Image (spheres, helix red, strand yellow):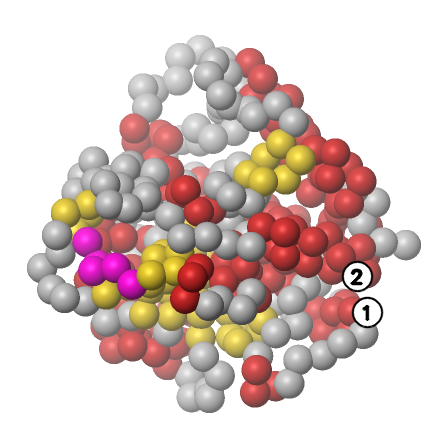
Amino acid sequence: MKRHDIIKKLAYGVPYSRTKRVILSTDLKNEADDQFAVMHHLLTPGHDVTGIVAAHFEGRRRFADELKGDEAGDPLAHFMLPRGESMMASYDEGKLLLELADIDDVPLFKGCSYEIGSSQYDGHNEGVDFIIREALKEDDRPLYVCALGAITDVAAAILREPGIAGRMTIIWIGGGDYPDGELEFNLMQDVEAARIVFASEAEVWQVPKGVYKMVELSFAELVTRVKGCGKVGDYLCQQMLDLNERGGAVPGDFPHGESWCLGDNPTVSVLLQNAQRICWHMEKAPYINDDGSYSKGQTDREIRVYDSVDSRLTLEDMFQKLAICYKM
């Protein structure tokens, strides 16, 4: 089915001149939250989702000791795929999600399998080609490239075609809070890629860790508001509960118990809400050190850094769209 036919059920439209072209770069199989953000974008009429790029999530493997013994029995094996396989896991998850959502006209592309700087870095791929192609299109509507994980594919596109930087706005879920920074998970995947994006001419909107953590979903909401919204709603619910259950064997604060952070949905929030200046501030683009900390950048270039997002608007908007479009 065409995406347009599904969102027609919302019974409202957005003037064409107010629509935005949106590319999603997402590590869909990394955890349990990207799927919610992707569906939220797809069900938002003002977002012309021109394509989805499957992203890698190699950081856990690169920064952890090799797993010993039976990986299938390890609760973290879901995250600890052998080097180079995580992007394909994201790609396969994207295919499944689009099938469950009954959407067959949004293209899905394979992105980079390795981080920039790796001897196996593969910056020539269909996902990077797509980002370049879309950025070079003549279209009066703005282009937003939303990076929900590693920012490798976006940086790879800029490296190959520097001229596209000024033709898009990059929204990145990642990086530590200011002023210090930290080796936050999405940043961990590819520090060099984040440096490239921050140093580019692109307009950058960063949603750091302390802000994206504000969007918290309770499992009571998950069961009452998401489950029952068609095959895709049932899947969104169950895959999160399953991951929460598997993670119960992991020491520390993973999983959370009765809630989960939908940390990627702020890419919807910042485009949906009336983002007055109280929600963000301009920051001199820092240099990102190997340990994720921030130091003074080499130029006076500024980026937009979000201080808050409207979690109520974000979650309620997603719940209602899922219900209207998929609940029987």
49 lies above or below 231? below
Is disc 2 placed on a helix, strand or loop?
helix
- Residue 92 appearing in the image: no
Q: Measure the C-alpha gap from mark 1 to mark 2.
A: 6 Å
Q: Which mark is residue 231?
A: none
**Residue at figure coordinates x 40%, y 56% from the top left:** 306
Please state if 237 lies on the left or on the right of 110 as rendered: right
Asked if residue 152 shows in the view, the reply is yes
Circles 1 and 2: CB distance less than 8 Å? yes
> Mainly helix, strand or loop, the magenta region?
strand
Mark 2 crowdedness (10 Å alpha carbons): few <14, some 14-19, many ≥20: some
Q: Which residues are magenta?
A: 282-286
Residue lying at the far right of the rendered structure: 328
153 lies left or right of 191: right
**x, y percent for residue 104:** 69, 65
Q: Is residue 41 magenta?
A: no
Tag 2: amino acid:
Cys
Query: Earlier along the polypeptide chain: callout 1 or callout 2?
Result: 1
Q: Is 23 positioned to the left or the right of 163 in the image?
A: right
Look at 56% across and 55% down and name the residue there: 310
Q: For the N terminus, which image quadrant?
A: bottom right
Residue 64 vs residue 203, the one in the foreground: 203
Quadrant placement of the C terminus: bottom right
Where does the image place residue 53, in percent across and percent down from the top left? 47, 58
Which residue in the structure is indicated by mark 2? Answer: 325
* Amino acid under disc 1: Lys
Residue 63 position, x and y percent, is 30, 28
Residue ID for mark 1: 9
